[in-house]
Amino acid sequence: MSAASTRSRTPDRLCAEAVDLARSAAEEAAAPGVVGEHAGTTVEGDRVVTHFFECKELGYRGWRWAVTVARASRAKVVTLDEVVLLPGPDALLAPEWVPWSERLRPGDMGPGDLLPTDAEDLRLEPGYSGEDEPAPNAPVSEEMALLAEAEDAEVSAGTPAQLPVVPTRGSIAAVAEELGLRRARVLSRYGLHIAADRWEEGYGAKTPMAQAAPATCVSCGFLARIGGSLGQAFGVCANEFSPADGRVVSLAYGCGGHSEAAVMPRPPQPPPPVIDETRVDHFPLRPSPDSGSVPPFPDEASAELGHA
């Protein structure tokens, strides 16, 4: 058996009775009036005892002042070891600290905020291969310096192939820089997958809006295509009345703003007139004499002629 296991867990009598010594040490370390009642003792080892006192300081609910006292072997004087404020079983504690990289959520960044990216970020991978040397056509490159020396030495006119140093073709990095594609890092397969999962969750086929849509975005005229491998499954919505306007949407997503969802109804047009050319309809020009209204045209004519 080890020496530690043979030690007695019975508190030393002199150390356990040194309550006044422990209280005075706690009151000296704490602010006046914040050391409460004695809350028990615990055995730390042979002739080593810790006294606990309640803490009445605001904001430290459930905390205790722990004062450790000790006594040397065969000595009758108890000495002070340490005084510290410790949380009790029901103490009010702050939540566990979480690194900022794990606390950050989409939308937390504001104007002027900088988000550093880890050099070993799994979402990114090197965008080009080769040494970090200046491009061959850069003024500071070694090749351009040799060409300048050669042109100074041979003032006579001639083609570049006739110079002592023939310029070589551009490297992959130089061509990428010329095309505007030279980036230090690009998305890795892992970065592409987590981006696709995130977009699919927000604007994918399983969303309630897509389930109720009349058709998918792949056939919508408002879909703007994107390049790269993600363009095979996603695009950008360009319908200002859609809830996904300006968002990256899955080709399987859909909404009621689909370009072919409904056709605007045309205004009603009256039917064309029907003309029956097989019969003759009689339309009298004057009402009949029985109606008692204006006399027929022949009587009017004869009356006018007799009067004349």
Image (cartoon, rainbow, N blue to C red):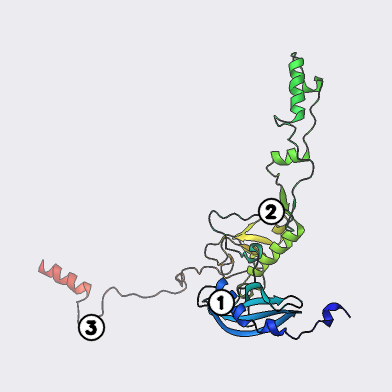
Mark nearest the camera among 1 and 3 is 1
**Residue where numbered disc 3 is placed:** 291
Mark 1 or mark 3: name the one nearer the start of the chain. 1
Do tag 1 and tag 2 residues touch (Cβ < 8 Å)? no
Camera-side residue of 129 and 28: 28
Label drawn at residue 227: 2
Element assignment for label 2: loop
Q: Residues within 10 Å of mark 2 (few under 14, many from 20)?
A: few
Gap in angstroms between the C-alphas marked 1 and 3: 113 Å
Gap in angstroms between the C-alphas marked 3 and 2: 87 Å
Camera-side residue of 48 and 281: 48
Camera-side residue of 12 and 290: 12
Please report the residue visible at 72 percent of the width from the left and 82 percent of the height from the top.
43
Q: Which quadrant: the N terminus?
A: bottom right
Mark nearest the camera among 3 and 2 is 2
Do tag 1 and tag 3 residues touch (Cβ < 8 Å)? no
**Mark 1 belongs to which amino acid?**
Tyr
From the top left corner, tell me how far across and down residue 16 is, in percent.
Answer: 68, 84
Element assignment for label 3: helix
Q: Is residue 176 above or below residue 250?
A: above
Q: Is residue 10 above or below residue 3?
A: below
Gap in angstroms between the C-alphas marked 1 and 2: 58 Å
Q: Residues within 10 Å of mark 3 (few under 14, many from 20)?
A: few
Mark 3 or mark 2: name the one nearer the start of the chain. 2
Say whether residue 71 is visible. yes
Label drawn at residue 224: none
Q: Is residue 234 left or right of residue 267?
A: right
**Residue where numbered disc 1 is placed:** 60
